[in-house]
Amino acid sequence: MGSDAVIIGGSTAGLLNGVMLKHHGYNVTILEQFSGTRDGYDAGITIGPDVKSFLAKHDRVQRPFALTCTPPLKFNIQGKPRLEHKQTMVMTCWALFSKILRVNYDGTTSTAVPVAPEPSVTDGTVEYRSGARVTGVKDVGDRVEVHYEDTNSHVSTTISAGLVVVADGSTSSIRKLLAPDIERRYAGYICWRGTISESSIKNKEFNENYSTPTDDGDLDQGKRLYNWVWYMNLPENSSDIERLFTDVNGKQHQGTLPRGLVRPENWEKQKSLALSVLPPGLAEVVSKTTRPFLTRIYDVTSSKIIFFNSKLFVVGDAAMSIRPNVGMSTQLAAYDCNMLERVIEGKITPSQWEKVFLRYKYAQRRFGLTVAAYGLRSKFTAVWEGLKWLLLLLLQKVGIK
Ligand SMILES: Cc1cc2nc3c(=O)[nH]c(=O)nc-3n(C[C@H](O)[C@H](O)[C@H](O)COP(=O)(O)OP(=O)(O)OC[C@H]3O[C@@H](n4cnc5c(N)ncnc54)[C@H](O)[C@@H]3O)c2cc1C
């Protein structure tokens, strides 16, 4: 490992690792294919213990960014709420969280975070290259070459570093190059997601459950957003999938169809369905949403995440995707980063990192499959998935897995 690093992908996992490595004195370059201003999907993310411990160590702006929500409610078909369990949830939104990471990385300010933190003399240098699509990586002895092209000019460039972190998401093209046998499989369902302003909800039972701040960091009651997710089974290659994932411009989307691009006739149809099948309060929340978005759910399970003699690490959704039903992907991206920090600090070896990482992720993956089966499949499937999860935990405990 050297004192410079290249990170492929500049979203959640990329920025988390960028901030961490910079604070450890690494000179970091993030290569992100997207150019221009990034819009969040306007949906909530759950803050777990690893996000909190990451921020306690690495966030130098310390602005409030999360809301503690009252315990989730379950509604019966008449719309009467029932408390399911007692734990609270800490929620924020992706765009606000990204802005906090970004200002800590390279001082980029925003309405949400208008003042950049003072750099420390021990920090490394940083760069965020947008519009840089990575096309290949190559082991060249004690360094890794990273090839990328400018998405506007199509000019190709090569840089190299002693450490490369691959954080290019669940569709990872770099993972495909390194481990072509790892498949990305459609999970058999999609989700509609959206937000509405808290103040526009008549049914007060819904307030403060699953509320998130706005992209600009507004946490005040009434201004913040109510966040909902609606999962639906849909067979692969069905005409409904094709219809729903064709945007207003006629373009097909594989993963997420972002806000503003859902065809109005599709949304009108979904709202009618909401009014006919959902309990009244929920139907109100869904049908008042003006900019929903859609995501197709995929499974990715890697069995190898370190390459090139421990100079290249695959993290975040690129390494393993966990069903969104458990709301863990940001927490898991922070977990990967905190564990990689232990490698950087010399507290664990890269192969220990890989072992612990895969063990934890396999368990989370099984848990996600159980929760998803509970909500979307038969009781039998949920019990079966639950048993497989418990068996895995047992085998992990006795050291067999
Ligand atoms: C714009 C955006 C908005 C989001 N909004 C929400 C939200 O509101 N709620 C929510 O729950 N989750 C949201 N997410 C998803 C969430 O960030 C991730 O699922 C999760 O946190 C894991 O993050 P990740 O960094 O591993 O993967 P991702 O967030 O998928 O990031 C992967 C990044 O790599 C880049 N990339 C891919 N291929 C290449 C390449 N070849 N070269 C260079 N760059 C590449 C992508 O453009 C992307 O920025 C959003 C993601 C994005 C990109």
Image (cartoon, rainbow, N blue to C red):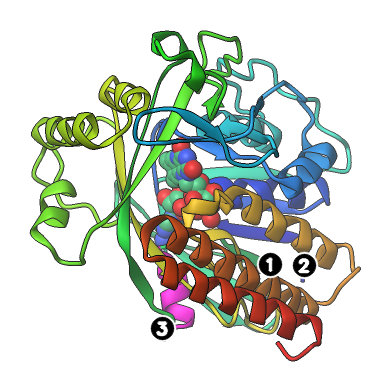
Residue at position x 77%, y 76% in the image: 350
Label 1's element?
strand
**Location of residue 298 (image quadrant):** bottom left
Residues in magenta, as a range: 171-179
Please state which of residues 221 and 164 is positioned toward the viewer in this rendering. Answer: 221
Mark 3: amino acid: Pro
Q: Is residue 329 magenta?
A: no
Q: Is residue 164 left or right of residue 223?
A: right
Q: Which residue is mark 1?
A: 163
Q: Is residue 196 above or below residue 176?
A: above
Q: Tell me if I can see residue 148 in this picture.
A: no
Q: Is residue 110 above or below residue 310?
A: above
Q: Are marks 3 and 2 in contact (CB under 8 Å)?
A: no
Q: Which residue is mark 2?
A: 2
Residue at position x 80%, y 78% in the image: 352
Rounded to the nearest whole Å, what is the CA distance between mark 2 and mark 1? 6 Å
Task: For ligand 1, tell me if the residue under mark 1 lies within 8 Å.
Answer: no
Please state which of residues 30 and 370 is positioned toward the viewer in this rendering. Answer: 370
Of the numbered discs 1 and 3, the one sitting upstream in the chain is: 1
Q: Are marks 1 and 3 in contact (CB under 8 Å)?
A: no
Please state which of residues 369 and 128 is positioned toward the viewer in this rendering. Answer: 369
**Location of residue 176 (image quadrant):** bottom left
Q: What numbered label is drawn on residue 180?
A: 3
> Can you give x and y, in whole percent of width and height, for residue 48 in the image?
69, 45
Residue at position x 47%, y 67% in the image: 382
Most extreme residue toward the bottom is: 400
Q: Tell me if I can see residue 205 in this picture.
A: yes
Label 2's element?
loop
Q: Is residue 113 left or right of residue 244?
A: right
Rounded to the nearest whole Å, what is the CA distance between mark 3 and mark 2? 27 Å
Q: Is residue 397 above or below residue 330?
A: below
